[in-house]
């Protein structure tokens, strides 16, 4: 059953009573349930979540970090993952059979992860092998489905994070002559460029037209980038940078490497979500920053650092729409379901997919 078929089922539709509850009432009820369930309940919250949800998180972090923390928390029977679908999948892969991972809203997916499905990827791999033979190693960003992680695992590759992408791409080039980087072309391009791969040595695989986009001799190709992107980070533009440079000449610009090559190249710095947070925390009081990442996080950094001038690189940016789907009503509904002994919105990865995905994760974690 597909995700779309799952979320269309009535059992996954938020009951009307939660839409009618006042915020204070929902917050009090959530606190009651957290106290009632104690250590049996664990709520990880991604950095991009709404403040109304983050306030109840037992841990805040990036997707893989939260999945690892969940796996270490053996006393937690119920893991209510406030993030998106692929993050909850990773948590399920790493936790035990005795632990249940729940996603408060099944509509909380990731447009980037959805840009590479397993059927497209298997087809692309055959086509690319016909062009390049056994010279490629697949790498996938952790922002991908469990099925894609499993594909990479069984084909000798590994996962990467935005924090360790440079190290993992170096490792991949020690194994094979070329890499296939899924599903975010911008992280792959920025990482490879930093490591000395020229832009004209990078090709793009288009899964829609099922063809390689490249001009020149295929013998020059070192990196094949999957034609996917983050809908949030791709919306930061060169014009945004030009505006900041002309309006705030002393302001530093820091962006996520999921932004385009042009934006990353014109910025003062770039790095993972964790890197951006630590850069702002370690900055001198009075410094000014334009940040190119998700708006919920930028707004939280503004609130947490009143001694610094902080703005979004794109003032018209909206929060990540899928991350934003998890709100107080859905969080409370998922917790009420646990208390009532129900089994709503459970994320479960089949054993074979999980086993192969772990191979990709372990190749990264064991380096």
Image: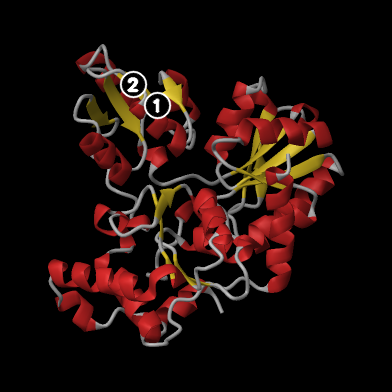
The answer to which quarter of the image holds residue 106 is bottom left
**Extreme-top residue of the structure:** 249
Q: Compute the Cα span from label 2 to label 1.
A: 6 Å
User: The N terminus appears in which quarter of the rendering?
Assistant: bottom right
Comparing 34 with 290, the one in front is: 34
Residue at point 66%, 19% (across, down): 196
Residue 237 visible in the current orientation = yes
Q: Residue 162's spot in the image, x, y percent? A: 54, 38
Q: Are marks 2 and 1 in contact (CB under 8 Å)?
A: yes
SS of the residue under disc 1: helix
Compared across the picture, whether 196 is left or right of 129 comes to left
Judging by the rendered image, the residue that carries numbered circle 1 is 279
Q: Which mark is residue 358?
A: none
Q: Residue 327's spot in the image, x, y percent? A: 28, 64
Residue 115 visible in the current orientation = no
Could you classify mark 1 by the number of other residues whose Cα lies within 10 Å: few (under 14), some (14-19), or many (20 or more)?
A: some
Q: Is residue 38 above or below residue 68?
A: below
Judging by the rendered image, the residue that carries numbered circle 2 is 283
Q: How is the image coloured?
A: secondary structure
Q: Is residue 285 above or below residue 61?
A: above
């Amino acid at each position: 059953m597909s995700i779309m078929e799952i979320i269309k089922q009535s059992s996954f539709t938020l009951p009307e009573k939660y839409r009618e509850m006042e915020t204070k009432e929902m917050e009090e009820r959530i606190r009651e349930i957290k106290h009632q369930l104690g250590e049996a309940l664990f709520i990880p919250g991604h950095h991009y979540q709404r403040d109304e949800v983050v306030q109840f998180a037992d841990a805040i972090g990036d997707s893989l970090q939260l999945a690892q923390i969940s796996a270490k928390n053996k006393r937690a029977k119920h893991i209510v993952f406030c993030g998106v679908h692929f993050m909850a999948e990773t948590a399920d892969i790493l936790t035990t059979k005795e632990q249940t991972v729940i996603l408060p809203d099944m509509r909380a997916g990731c447009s980037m992860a959805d840009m590479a499905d397993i059927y497209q990827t298997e087809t692309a791999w055959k086509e690319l092998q016909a062009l390049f033979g056994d010279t490629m190693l697949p790498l996938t960003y952790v922002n991908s489905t469990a099925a894609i992680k499993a594909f990479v695992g069984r084909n000798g590759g590994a996962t990467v994070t935005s924090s360790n992408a440079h190290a993992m791409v170096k490792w991949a080039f020690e194994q094979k002559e070329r890499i296939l980087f899924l599903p975010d072309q911008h992280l792959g391009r920025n990482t490879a460029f930093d490591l000395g791969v020229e832009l004209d040595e990078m090709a793009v695989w288009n899964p829609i037209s099922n063809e390689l986009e490249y001009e020149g001799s295929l013998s020059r190709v070192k990196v094949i980038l999957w034609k996917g992107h983050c809908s949030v980070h791709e919306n930061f533009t060169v014009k945004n940078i030009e505006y900041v440079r002309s309006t705030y000449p002393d302001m530093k610009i820091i962006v996520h490497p999921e932004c385009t090559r042009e934006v990353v190249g014109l910025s003062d710095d770039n790095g993972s979500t964790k890197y951006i947070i630590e850069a702002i925390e370690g900055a001198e009081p009075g410094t000014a920053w334009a940040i190119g990442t998700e708006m919920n996080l930028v707004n939280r950094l503004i609130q947490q650092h009143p001694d610094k001038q902080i703005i979004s690189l794109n003032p018209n940016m909206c929060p990540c729409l899928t991350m934003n789907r998890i709100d107080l009503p859905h969080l409370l509904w998922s917790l009420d379901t646990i208390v009532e002994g129900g089994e709503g919105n459970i994320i479960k990865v089949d054993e074979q997919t999980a086993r192969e995905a772990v191979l990709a994760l372990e190749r990264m974690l064991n380096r």
